[in-house]
């Protein structure tokens, strides 16, 4: 097997990670830096930099000199109201960002030494941060698309039948002039209809993309969103056997292997979007394994506190 520059990159070793983020003080400093790169700035409109610092319990807190509003380090971030140490959160960020094929909540529970509900919430909050970060980008240029299912495969035109826990999604990969993958997008859609594809394309593609599909009629919907469509009729051959679809099918194969190995069955309709987003997030940053934890930290800071709708009613908070 030839040496692959993605597989063989050094990444961030666990000892190196612990040396940088092993104590609560180090994690606080990293979070403060991610939140206020130029130093504290009052989140209220006054934007004042002058402040005093103190602790409420163990929580580092800032008081604005101008308006006297008090802001804790974690208020207004993904970590708001957490009862867990930042070292636990940072370790979770590290483990989730470095796990190529994902990590189950159960594995996270064991590695972090937290309860299952806490592990579940940590994972879902971080996946949501990845999802929202992905949503800021659209694919450009030449894009290969493929129709796929979470929980099954399309075969013989029996799409979506026979299983309630089966969710259709679009897999798309932007390729460069040599046909190599650059970025991917994975998104659940209501069904393989022209309207659903048009809505997907408006959200995930920049206008003017050249979309290459295997000829499934609904993909013509990308034209309604300002892209060009180049259907490739596959005839009796499977799309994965055609060079045009090599990458998208390789990526889908990796996704399937990863999901099969790392996750137990989950509610695809409810959570599929987050799992797909986490896969795409890692894939799109595959050359940056070492800086991934700090990138994910930045995403967690900018996403803000999790709205109630994230939380399953029966789950304890973490
Ligand atoms: Zn203020």
Image (cartoon, helix red, strand yellow):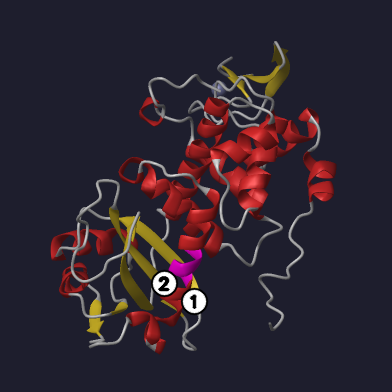
Q: Is residue 195 magenta?
A: no
The answer to which image quadrant residue 34 occupies is: top right
Q: Main secondary structure of the magenta part?
A: helix
Query: Would residue 116 be seen by someone viewing this image from the given angle?
Result: yes
Tell me the number on the disc at residue 173: 2
**Label 1 CB, ligand 1: below 8 Å?**
no
Task: Tell me residue 29's x, y (percent).
Answer: 75, 34
Q: Which residue is rendered at x = 30% and y = 46% of the image? A: 165
Element type at marker 2? strand
Q: Quadrant of ligand 1?
A: top right
Q: Quadrant of the N terminus?
A: bottom right
Give the total of numbered labels. Answer: 2
The magenta segment = 251-255
Query: Would residue 39 be seen by someone viewing this image from the given angle?
Result: no
The answer to which image quadrant residue 299 occupies is: top right
Q: Is residue 215 above or below residue 279?
A: below
Element type at marker 1? strand
Task: Tell me residue 130's x, y (percent).
Answer: 49, 48
Camera-nearest residue between 231 and 199: 231
Q: Earlier in the sequence, mark 1 or mark 2?
A: 2
Q: Which residue is under mark 1?
A: 181
How crowded is the residue under tag 1: few (<14 C-alpha within 10 Å), some, or many (20+)? many
**Label 2 CB, ligand 1: below 8 Å?**
no
Q: Quadrant of the C terminus?
A: top right
Camera-nearest residue between 44 and 278: 278
Q: Which residue is rendered at x = 35% and y = 29% of the image? A: 309
Is 140 on the left or on the right of 92, as rendered? Answer: left
Q: Is residue 21 above or below residue 59?
A: below
């Amino acid at each position: 097997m030839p040496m692959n520059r993605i597989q063989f990159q050094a990444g961030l070793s666990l000892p190196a990670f612990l040396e940088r983020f092993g104590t609560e003080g180090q994690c606080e400093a990293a979070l403060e830096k991610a939140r206020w790169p130029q130093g504290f700035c009052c989140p209220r409109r006054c934007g004042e930099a002058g402040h005093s610092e103190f602790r409420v319990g163990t929580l580092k807190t800032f008081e604005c000199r101008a308006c006297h509003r008090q802001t804790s380090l974690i208020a207004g971030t993904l970590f708001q109201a957490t009862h867990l140490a930042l070292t636990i959160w940072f370790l979770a960020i590290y483990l989730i960002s470095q796990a190529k094929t994902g990590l189950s909540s159960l594995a996270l529970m064991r590695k972090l030494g937290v309860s299952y509900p806490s592990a579940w919430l940590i994972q879902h909050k971080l996946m949501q941060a990845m999802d929202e970060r992905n949503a800021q980008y659209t694919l450009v240029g030449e894009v290969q698309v493929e129709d796929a299912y979470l929980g099954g495969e399309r075969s013989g035109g029996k799409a979506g039948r026979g299983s309630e826990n089966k969710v259709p999604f679009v897999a798309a990969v932007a390729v460069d002039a040599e046909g190599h993958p650059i970025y991917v997008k994975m998104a659940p859609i209501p069904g393989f209809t022209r309207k659903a594809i048009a809505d997907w394309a408006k959200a995930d593609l920049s206008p003017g993309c050249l979309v290459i599909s295997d000829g499934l009629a609904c993909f013509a919907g990308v034209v309604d969103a300002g892209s060009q469509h180049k259907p490739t009729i596959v005839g009796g051959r499977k799309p994965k056997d055609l060079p045009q679809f090599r990458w998208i099918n390789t990526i889908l194969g990796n996704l399937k292997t990863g999901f099969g190995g790392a996750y137990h069955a989950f509610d695809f309709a409810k959570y599929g979007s987050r799992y797909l987003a986490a896969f795409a997030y890692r894939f799109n940053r595959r050359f940056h394994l070492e800086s991934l934890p700090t990138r994910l930290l930045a995403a967690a800071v900018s996403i803000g506190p999790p709205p109630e709708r994230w939380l399953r009613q029966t789950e304890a908070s973490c």
